[in-house]
Image (tube, grey):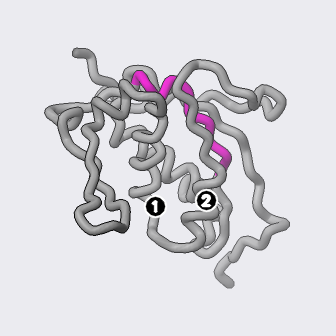
Amino acid sequence: MKTFTATPADIDKKWIIIDAEGVVLGRLASIVAMRLRGKHKPSFTPHMDCGDNVIIINAEKVQMTGKKREEHFYWHTGHPGGIKSRTKAQILEGAHPERIVTQAVKRMLPGNRLSRQIMTNLRVYAGGEHPHEAQSPEVLDVKSMNSKNTRSA
């Protein structure tokens, strides 16, 4: 019995759409990272991009538990004294609320070249509209997978 290794001809990519309204951020990000990587498929190969294309809509309506809305994202400009920070609540209320979901998914993937390539298969939209109707994406209902995936209050 030989170990199966997927080749580019063996890879079958699907399009999946996920509605993030009312879903807890970390749980959403872990499910999306698994789908992007392709770990849900029996033909998973660690060194190949065998995951699906994922579309996330309503990213501005994602939920967080506890005091995570008040936690800061930090980055540095590269200049002396150039540390910057924003709270997650400020980012969600700002011009690009989809960046919260993108960062959460990015940080759940390994930090290598393949992960940067995999991140191109993720599309996140703040509202309910997306321009990918031609790909006829399948709906993945994250809310019904586990009762803990949603936050009620």
Hey, which quadrant is residue 47 in on the image?
bottom right
From the viewer's perspective, is residue 145 above or below residue 113?
above
Q: Amino acid at mark 2?
A: Ile
Is the C terminus in the top left, top right, bottom left or bottom right quadrant?
A: top left
Q: Residue 15 in the image: x percent, y percent?
A: 71, 40
Hey, which quadrant is residue 6 in on the image?
bottom right
Residue matched to label 1 = 109
Q: Amino acid at mark 1?
A: Leu
Q: Is residue 16 something one can see in this rendering?
A: yes
Residue shown at the point (27%, 68%) measured from the top left: 80
In front of the other: 106 or 140: 106
Start and end of the magenta stretch?
52-61
In front of the other: 81 or 15: 81
Q: Is residue 42 left or right of residue 145?
A: right
Q: Residue 38 in the image: x percent, y percent?
A: 59, 57
From the viewer's perspective, is residue 117 above or below residue 20?
below
Helix, strand or loop status at disc 2: helix
Helix, strand or loop status at disc 1: loop
Residue matched to label 2 = 118
Q: Is residue 26 left or right of residue 113?
A: left
